[in-house]
Amino acid sequence: MRTDRLSLWSAVTVLGLFASLACGTRARADNDLNLGGNFNSGGFYTFNGSSPGGGGPISPSTLNGVALPYVYCIDIPDNVYVPVDYKHSTVTNNGYAIVGPGNPQSNGGLALTPNAGTIAWLLTQYALTATTTTKQDALQAAIWTAIYGYNTPGYALVVTNSAVFQQMQTDLGNNPYSSTVTLAHAGTASVSNFYWLSPGDGSSTIYQALVTANVGGATLTAPEPSTFAIAGLGAMAFVAYGLRRREALGA
């Protein structure tokens, strides 16, 4: 009977742990993301043979009323409209975003952005100093290259403007005049220093996912009460298991 009890408490412990971890990564979709109307045109790149609009930085933008220093795109196939106030946006600080078909991480729900650490490094290094259109377009192109690769089958991202291409190569640590594009010379940084944004308007539409700096004053909506309840269940299960195990060892 003791073995059965320990197995039961072990099961409860594991289930509680998984539940608390799963709920801990959930994000409420009711953050207010207000995107301004200024952004760069899409004349510096093509994607699968077409030029599907512009890129970052989108400004002036706010998150829950707090001004954002910049907003760049981490998604090409989906669209985002500006200026628009997306009052039901999902925000994470773990590199996860919601993207639609045509993206490598598409699953209709939160998914990890490919090479999120590299994107975090690029933003850390260049976002605040990218004050010219060429530098901004190069940073946007470098972010997309980290996600889609460069001129790869299925994701044929190509930078058509030579000045932007050379700056992108410089940002990535490559020879600016080399035709070979690689991420090998780029660094990585903590994804938690950034907010990964999935704009939403309360409908089922998937809009273009974005990224910005983790602005401390932009308080995100609190986790649902069920998150705390299930996390508490996991903690209680650990305590109960420990007591049972100590009782068993002392018997």
Image (tube, helix red, strand yellow):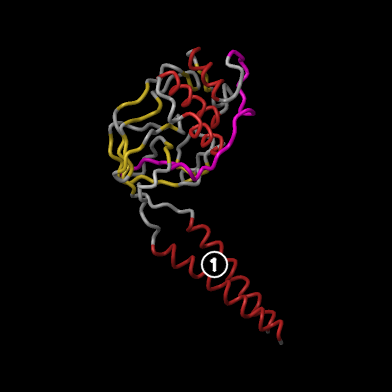
Establish if 200 lies above or below 125.
Answer: below
Side of 122 relative to 195 (left or right): right
Quadrant housing residue 36: top left
- Observer-nearest residue: 75 or 61? 61
Q: Quadrant of the N terminus?
A: bottom right
The picture places residue 5, in percent across and down from the top left corner, at 64, 80
Establish if 145 lies above or below 96.
Answer: above
Establish if 123 lies above or below 95.
Answer: above
The residue tagged 1 is: 16
- Asked if the stretch drawn in magenta spans residue 184, the answer is yes
Main SS of residues in magenta: loop
Numbered marks: total: 1
Q: Which kind of residue does numbered mark 1 sit on?
A: Gly
Point 33% across, 43% down: residue:
63
- Asked if the stretch drawn in magenta spans residue 151, the answer is no
Q: Residues within 10 Å of mark 1 (few under 14, many from 20)?
A: many
- Observer-nearest residue: 239 or 99? 239
The picture places residue 124, in percent across and down from the top left corner, at 49, 34
- Observer-nearest residue: 161 or 47? 161
- Range of magenta residues: 177-202
The picture places residue 162, in percent across and down from the top left corner, at 50, 12
Secondary structure of the residue carrying numbered label 1: helix
The picture places residue 187, in percent across and down from the top left corner, at 59, 33
Quadrant housing residue 225: bottom left
- Observer-nearest residue: 102 or 65? 65
**Residue that sits furthest to the front in the current view:** 129
**Residue that sits furthest to the bottom in the current view:** 251
Side of 204 relative to 244 (left or right): left
Q: Quadrant of the C terminus?
A: bottom right
Point 48% across, 53% down: residue:
25
